[in-house]
Structures are given as C-alpha cells and as structure tokens.
Image (cartoon, rainbow, N blue to C red):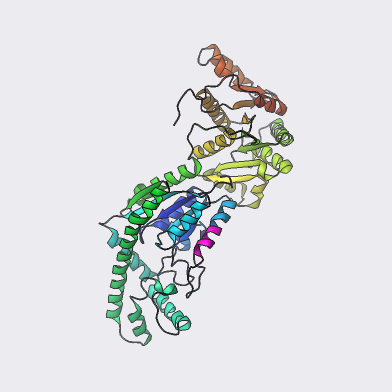
C-alpha cells in the first residue's frame, strides 16, 4: 500500500462478541495492526477484568492503545495519541484495524481520523439474542478461572494507595464492571470473613451488569454509530455472532473478504489512466530461479540499470531470489528503495523466509525495495496492474526469463489489453533466444486463426534492455479500451 493512502478497517460491537478475535484475523490477512478503542483496556492493571487480549489471542499481531495508563489516570488524551498511532502505522505501510465498542471514545476518534483524510470500511458485530447471555456467562466463568478474584484483590490494594482507601467506582480502572459488584466480597475477604454468599451474589451481579452493558452498547451502535457511518458514506457490514462453531463461516470469512477487498482491491477492474507528471512504472514478471545461463541474470541487471538511467520505477512480485531478485536489488542499489515496490502474498513470503532462513521482517529485505504483504495472488495482481495504469507515459509490462508463473502473469495482462481493460504496452525480453519457441507459437496461433494480427501486436518482442524501454515508449497500435463496460 502506498504511504500516501489512509485506509483503515473498523471492527465494532458490544462486549463479548469476539471483536478481538476478528480484529486479529483481519489484521493478519491485510498486513495490519490493531488500534484498540476501549476505555478500560487502556489501563496497565486489570488485564482480566477488562478482557485485554492475551499473547495467545493477539497471535503475533501488534496492538496499540492498550495498557498505557496508570490505575488512577483518565484517557483524556486518547484521541490525540490514537491519531499518532494511525499515522505511524501509515508511515510503516501497515493498515490500522480499529477495534472497540467504547461509546465515549469511538466517535471522537473516527471524526478526527475522517477529517484527516482517512478512509474506512466498518464491520459491526451483533450478538444473537438466543445465545448472547450464555456467551457472557461463559466468558465471565473463564475470567474467574484465569484469576479474576486475585486481580481484583490487587486493584483493592491500588485503591488503598491512590484513593486513600475510599472507593470511587467512577474513577480510573475501578470503573470496570466486576470491581464494584465484588467489592463487598473483597472487603470481607480482606478481614478473613466467611464470604461464599457474597462471592456468589457478586458474580451474579457482574454477569447481569455485563449483559446490560452489552445491550446498552448494542443500542448505541444501532442508534448512534450506524447512522454516523451512513451519514459519512462509510461501507458497513453487520454480522450476527451466534456461537464459536459458526463463527468462521458467518463472521470470519465475510469480514476478512470485505476488509481485503476494501484495502487492496477497492478500485474497479476497469482502471483509469492518471498520467500527468507521474514517473514511468514497469511491472516485471520473471523467474524466482536464476536459470542455468548467467545471461538471464545479466539481462535482469541490465534492465535495472536502464530503469535507473531513465528514472523508471518497477513493481514486481516481491521475491528476493533469481531473475526477480537481480533486477530489484540492482535498481535499489542505483536509485534507492523507493524505486522498487515488491508486492508479495503472505504465503509466499513465509515460504521464501523458510527456504532462506530469514525472518519475514529481516532488515535485509530492504535491499529489494519497499514491500507490501497481501493476502492472495489476485490482490497482488490488481495492485501491480494499478501501479502501471497510474504511471506516466511509457509505463507497461515486461516479461523476463522464467517459467509457468511468468507466462501466466504475462498472458493475463496481454488478455486484459485484448479485452480493453488497459491500454499499456506489453514487452517480452527475449534473452539469447529463450522465448523463440513462444514467438513461433504466436505466429502459429495467428496462422490458425485463433487471434488476429491486431491481437498479435499486443505483445512486443525485444532482445535488449534498451529495446524494452523503446518498445514501451511507443503507443500500442490498437486498443479496445472503453469498448466493453467492465464493473
């Protein structure tokens, strides 16, 4: 994703609807990080009673705006600090996933972000009335098992320290549901008084008040948040949460699909040219292997040098090995990392990291330019094609020596030109006659009547890197752009 873009995903819902789980799932699918919008999870103490995500639940996804306040502080500067986190994530090309249900913090943050040019798609989680109460009860039982009572006793100690032993259930961490409800139990426990009944009634009150708070949040979502999203023309998908068994199918998959489409494929397949003074961009297809003949690597490096001399940027599939790694590293060495944009699906990044023994976030990857990690191959193709279409005059697609994947991607953009989806040039660098067989096949296809001469002219053939650049400067002989209505 380009650093000038401000895309974020919002995940909102009442307590106990699985916002944390969904936020992590979405973040992992779009190379994102979570920004929490919770007025209680921002406190350092009280991890259990505020349902902060555990290390296991975050699953390696960075979370922000959690645990930064002391027990007696208030989140008065929350919006300003959260905006800073959003901008920092944008600078690092990570997509913010804003997760929460705070009725006091959510709208102020969204208003500020939207005023600053952020674009958002929202997902609201709605509990199913038949299972919500049982889900709440089960969640609180898990809290008790995780050590809730011991944690609340610790908050009582902090109360004695910061509030001089005078309880204030409207201040700091002590606002959390559970502290006031179990306060009689905590006081009796401190005096070593038999208090089983106090514990039982306190837990029952905690469950009832948590459920009631969830209903209040739900009404706020329906009456305040959703009308706000509608007024701001923000796409919003509402999903009903029933139980754990149906979560993946009913919640996870549709939410991830929407988030991915919004962040990485939100433009129509029929792209518009925006040339102006934009730099030329070449989309490079080629092998992740070096081949047996060193000429293939030298040809890639030569094209990298020619791109540097002509102030041309490249976008490619993000690999660091073989032909692709050679052109990327050559251009980065000469023009700097901004001249190269690698777009790689997460599965391929992990595979390459495993094969090379490098961590996916290893600084060594900077030698191959900027990197964007996406969910799948389709998203990668859309983003690469978009960069060419919005590039300056002479932008286009180049096929270097490679195998199945190279030809698959090359002929897809040829077909898209044939269908009028774009009107950029497509050129094949035929190093040492590597593609002679393909060129002969193309002649046979014309001779046998499967394509016309106009269609055959879509793919230009060059034998040198200089020839590639010259081919793409020339306007294609014909274009069907605009003949078909693509949506």
Q: Position of residue 292 (x, y in %)?
A: 68, 32
The majority secondary structure of the magenta stretch comes to helix
Q: Give the residue drawn at x 66%, y 48%.
A: 366
Q: Is residue 349 left or right of residue 242?
A: right
463 lies above or below 173:
above
| Image coordinates for residue 314, horizontal then vertical, percent | 64, 37
The image shows residue 322, relative to residue 43, as above or below, that is: above
Q: Is residue 124 left or right of 428 when viewed as pictured?
A: left
Q: Quadrant of the C terminus?
A: top left
> Is 266 located above or below residue 411 in the figure?
below
Q: Which residues are magenta?
A: 75-84
Furthest residue in direction left, as rendered: 130
Question: Compared with residue 439, is residue 296 higher up or lower down, i.e. above or below?
Answer: below
Q: Is residue 405 magenta?
A: no
* Residue at 57% in and 49% down: 93
In the image, is 256 to the left or to the right of 433? left
* Number of numbered markers: 0
Q: Quadrant of the N terminus?
A: top right
- Of 325 and 379, the residue lying toward us: 379
**In the picture, residue 203 is in which quadrant?**
bottom left
Res. 404 in view: no
Determine the residue positioned at 69% across, 41% down. 329
Residue 389 figure quarter: top right
Asked whether residue 194 is in view, the answer is yes
Quarter of the view holding residue 181: bottom left
**Residue 133, position in %: x, y?**
28, 62
């Amino acid at each position: 994703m380009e650093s000038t873009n401000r895309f974020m995903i919002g995940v909102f819902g009442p307590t106990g609807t699985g916002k944390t789980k969904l936020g992590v799932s979405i973040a992992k699918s779009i190379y994102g990080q979570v920004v929490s919008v919770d007025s209680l999870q921002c406190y350092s103490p009280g991890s259990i009673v505020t349902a902060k995500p555990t290390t296991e639940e975050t699953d390696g996804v960075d979370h922000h705006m959690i645990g930064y306040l002391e027990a007696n502080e208030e989140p008065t500067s929350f919006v300003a600090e959260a905006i800073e986190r959003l901008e920092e994530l944008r600078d690092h090309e990570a997509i913010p996933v804003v997760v929460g249900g705070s009725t006091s913090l959510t709208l102020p943050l969204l208003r500020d972000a939207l005023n600053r040019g952020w674009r958002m798609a929202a997902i609201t989680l709605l509990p199913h009335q038949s299972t919500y109460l049982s889900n709440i009860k089960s969640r609180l039982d898990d809290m008790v098992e995780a050590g809730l009572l011991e944690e609340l006793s610790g908050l009582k100690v902090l109360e004695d320290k910061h509030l001089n032993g005078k309880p204030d259930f409207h201040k700091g961490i002590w606002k959390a549901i559970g502290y006031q409800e179990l306060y009689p139990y905590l006081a009796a426990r401190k005096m070593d008084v038999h208090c089983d009944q106090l514990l039982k009634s306190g837990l029952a009150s905690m469950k009832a008040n948590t459920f009631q708070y969830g209903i209040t949040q739900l009404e706020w979502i329906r009456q305040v948040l959703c009308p706000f999203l509608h007024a701001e023309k923000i796409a919003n998908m509402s999903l009903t949460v029933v139980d754990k068994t149906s979560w993946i199918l009913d919640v996870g998959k549709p939410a991830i699909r929407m988030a991915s489409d919004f962040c990485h494929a939100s433009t129509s397949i029929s792209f518009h040219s925006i040339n102006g003074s934009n730099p030329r961009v070449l989309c490079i297809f080629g092998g992740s292997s070096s081949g047996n003949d060193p000429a293939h690597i030298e040809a890639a490096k030569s094209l990298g040098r020619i791109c540097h001399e002509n102030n041309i940027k490249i976008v490619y599939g993000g690999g660091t090995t073989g032909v692709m790694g050679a052109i990327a590293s050559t251009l980065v060495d000469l023009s700097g990392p901004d001249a190269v944009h690698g777009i790689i699906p997460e599965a391929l990044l992990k595979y390459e990291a495993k094969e090379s023994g490098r961590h996916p976030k290893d600084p060594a990857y900077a030698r191959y330019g900027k990197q964007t990690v996406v969910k799948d191959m389709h998203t990668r193709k859309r983003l690469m094609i978009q960069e060419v279409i919005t590039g300056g005059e002479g932008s286009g697609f180049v096929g270097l020596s490679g195998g199945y994947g190279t030809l698959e991607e090359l002929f897809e953009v040829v077909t898209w030109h044939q269908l009028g989806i774009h009107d950029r040039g497509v050129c094949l660098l035929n190093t040492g006659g590597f593609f002679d067989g393909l060129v002969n096949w193309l002649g046979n296809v014309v001779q046998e009547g499967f394509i016309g001469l106009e269609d055959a002219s879509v793919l230009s053939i060059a034998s040198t890197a200089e020839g590639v650049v010259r081919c793409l400067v020339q306007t294609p002989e014909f274009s069907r752009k605009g003949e078909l209505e693509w949506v």
